[in-house]
């Protein structure tokens, strides 16, 4: 069953719920979400604050566990995986782009990109070669030896994208990637991601309420109070 | 790359890293200096004991060590003298007659160990002749005596004054002899000074009414490293001389000073306790600093976990950070301690302000620390290891973080 899923879907979410406890009071962040994402999709999960977008993205990205339900990533049911196995899945299959860029402040742009490759055990020379190639591809090769505090927000987010795709992941999860960027920089970044989606076949799933992101989505899922209220494919 | 990240994280908060490194430096420095100081102190105590009185090797009658009275002295020392003269190990020796008795002046008296020596021979074996502070060392004549400053004060006796020594003769009568004080000595051991007076062996034999009696042969192997060889050779020769009757016994300074040797061993063991105490203090310091470092970087650990860094690698990164700090602190501490010890071992650590107390220990008031390579190696291994141990708890805290919560933290 799982291997059949792997051929057609990169993400399968089945009846996922997430209940938080806030001072002992249960808060239902997700209430029975089910969805499937095909390889190469460029999907956006939108919705108002507190609707459960980030929670869903975290659960898909194996950073958080659902209270109930099933998550199948690239044919693998992740529910029963250990922390170590989940770290391995994230390393090999998922790239993350965060709203606040989240680059390591003590590393240069190139080293930040190399970091995930190092975790995967790629040797130093190959890491450097691939890291530089990625920075060139994203148009920030001149920033290779600069640290995050020497870069603008847009530049940092490009480095974050380079880091996210450095291990050739099948899936990139981007949590509000344009929220801290001005509109011009945000459009440039989105175009870059679209290009990676078209040319590299990388599946992108965004959580965002930025109209610029939503209008570029191939598929739009709108969450409200932990439910998917809209699931539409843009033409 | 893990080491590179660890190193940059160390440099990131320079003040904190500096404080931790400084505490390691102080710990290592104190540890090494204390070790070298105590070793130097103990070695000086031992050397003084050997040099002033005991010597490296002694031959006497069996049981003399337990009851060093005149009754346990060797009546016919000729065979041993012949044996020592014929020994091939280039040793030096001197014979002594020793008894316990009284020394009296017109004012006071004191119970002392009266040591009868052959002045010129004794000079080659022990250092007592070098401690003369007033007057002269014993000459060839009889009825001269050297006493310590402490005894001189007690007896109110000075150079040239007449004192009387008296002790039991082998037949139970009391023998006495009037002697003139020819010299006053002062060693680095106040306890020794209060209980020892020196006269020529003839004077003592005269007083005790004995002819050739010798209490102890004190043997110097010339070089300390030669001692086991000399001891072994003498043991065999002595066995041949005394035959199956076991008339003599030979003892090394370790056998003659068992409490002292035990004390040396005790101090060696005690230093493991000192290591332990310093290690515990360091561990708490490291836990504190590394916990702060983990707390400050919770967000970064969350991101690292998100991008696929395993718990093992996060754990290792924190341990490497502590290890690098430990190595840096240890190296600096060792270098400072080494040069301090080097300087002090050349010129000595003058503790004249504690002279009275140090004289009661018999060490002298200037201590020359002795640093061994093994001290450096032990510190170089133990301290960085301790810093790693101290970082285990903070590392455990880091890997127990939940990625989502960690990313949310600022």
Image (cartoon, coloured by chain):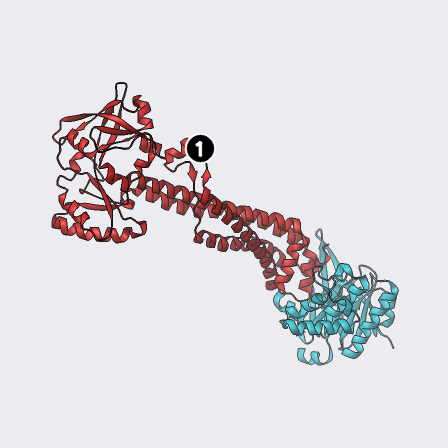
Chain colours: A cyan, B red
Q: Could you say where residue B107 lies in the image, as x and y percent from the top left?
A: 28, 18
Q: Left or right: where does residue B87 sit relative to residue B284?
A: left
Disc 1 is placed on an element classified as helix
Between B174 and A229, the residue placed more toward the observer is B174
Q: Which residue is mark 1?
A: B354
For the question of whether residue B149 can be seen, the reply is yes
Can residue A67 be seen here? The reply is no
Q: Is residue B333 left or right of residue A88?
A: left
Answer above or below: position of B86 versus B260: below
Instruction: Give residue A32's position: percent from left, percent from top.
Output: 75, 66
Quadrant containing the C terminus of chain A in the rendered view: bottom right
> Where is residue A209, by image quadrant?
bottom right
Q: In the image, what residue occupies the spot 36% across and 40% down?
A: B45
| Foreground pick, B321 / B338 | B338
Q: Position of residue A29 (x, y in %)?
A: 76, 60
- What residue is rendered at 65% in x and 67% in y? A87
Task: Quadrant for residue B362, please give it.
Answer: top left
| Left or right of residue B101: residue A221 | right
> Image quadrant for the N terminus of chain A?
bottom right
Q: What is the crowding at mark 1: few (fewer than 14 residues within 10 Å), some, or many (at least 20)?
A: few
Q: Residue at x 17, y 33 (%)?
A: B202
């Amino acid at each position: 069953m799982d291997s059949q899923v792997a051929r057609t879907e990169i993400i399968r979410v089945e009846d996922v719920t997430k209940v938080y406890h806030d001072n002992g009071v249960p808060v239902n962040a997700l209430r029975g979400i089910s969805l499937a994402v095909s390889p190469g999709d460029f999907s956006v999960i939108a919705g108002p604050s507190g609707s459960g977008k980030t929670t869903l993205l975290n659960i898909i990205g194996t950073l958080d566990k659902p209270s109930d339900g099933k998550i199948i990533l690239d044919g693998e049911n992740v529910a029963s995986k250990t922390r170590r196995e989940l770290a391995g899945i994230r390393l090999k299959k998922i790239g993350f782009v965060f709203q606040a860029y989240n680059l390591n402040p003590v590393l240069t742009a190139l080293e930040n990109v190399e970091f995930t490759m190092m975790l995967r055990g790629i040797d130093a020379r190959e890491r450097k070669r691939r890291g530089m190639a990625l920075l060139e591809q994203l148009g920030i090769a001149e920033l290779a030896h600069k640290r995050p505090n020497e870069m603008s927000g847009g530049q940092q987010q490009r480095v974050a994208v380079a880091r996210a795709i450095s291990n050739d992941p099948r899936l990139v999860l981007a949590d509000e990637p344009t929220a801290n960027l001005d509109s011009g920089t945000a459009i440039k970044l989105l175009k870059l991601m679209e290009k990676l989606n078209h040319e590299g076949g990388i599946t992108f799933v965004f959580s965002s309420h930025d109209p610029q992101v939503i209008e570029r989505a191939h598929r739009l899922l709108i969450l409200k109070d932990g439910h998917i209220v809209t699931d539409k494919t843009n033409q | 790359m893990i080491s590179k990240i660890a190193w940059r994280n160390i440099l990131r908060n320079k003040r904190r890293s500096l404080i931790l490194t400084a505490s390691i430096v102080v710990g290592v420095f104190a540890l090494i200096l204390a070790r070298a100081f105590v070793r130097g102190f103990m070695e000086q105590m031992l050397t003084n004991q050997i040099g002033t009185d005991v010597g490296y090797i002694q031959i006497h009658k069996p049981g003399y060590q337990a009851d060093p009275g005149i009754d346990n002295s060797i009546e016919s020392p000729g065979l041993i003298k012949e044996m020592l003269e014929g020994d091939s190990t280039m040793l030096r020796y001197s014979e002594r007659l020793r008894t316990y008795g009284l020394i009296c002046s017109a004012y006071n008296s004191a119970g002392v160990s009266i040591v009868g020596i052959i002045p010129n021979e004794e000079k080659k074996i022990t250092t007592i002749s070098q401690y003369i502070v007033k007057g002269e060392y014993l000459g060839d004549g009889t009825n001269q005596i050297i006493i310590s400053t402490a005894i001189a004060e007690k007896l109110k006796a000075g150079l040239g004054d007449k004192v009387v020594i008296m002790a039991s003769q082998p037949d139970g009568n009391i023998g006495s002899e009037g002697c003139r004080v020819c010299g006053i000595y002062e060693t680095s051991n106040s306890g020794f000074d209060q209980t020892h007076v020196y006269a020529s062996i003839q004077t003592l034999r005269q007083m005790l009414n004995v002819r050739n009696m010798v209490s102890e042969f004190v043997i110097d192997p010339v070089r300390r490293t030669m001692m086991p060889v000399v001891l072994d050779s003498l043991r065999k020769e002595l066995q041949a001389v005394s035959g199956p009757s076991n008339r003599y016994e030979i003892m090394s300074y370790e056998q003659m000073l068992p409490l002292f040797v035990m004390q040396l061993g005790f101090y060696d063991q005690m230093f493991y306790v000192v290591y332990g105490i310093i290690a515990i203090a360091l561990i708490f310091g490291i836990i504190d600093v590394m916990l702060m470092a983990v707390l400050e970087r919770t967000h970064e650990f969350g991101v690292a976990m998100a991008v696929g860094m395993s718990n093992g690698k996060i754990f290792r990164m924190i341990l490497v950070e502590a290890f690098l700090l430990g190595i840096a602190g240890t190296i600096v501490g060792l270098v400072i301690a080494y040069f301090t010890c080097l300087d002090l071992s050349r010129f000595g650590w003058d503790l004249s302000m504690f002279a009275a107390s140090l004289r009661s220990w018999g060490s002298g008031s200037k201590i020359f620390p002795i640093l061994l390579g093994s001290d450096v190696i032990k510190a170089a291994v133990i301290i960085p290891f301790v810093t790693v141990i101290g970082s285990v708890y903070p590392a455990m805290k880091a890997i127990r973080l939940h990625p989502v919560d960690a990313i949310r933290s600022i």
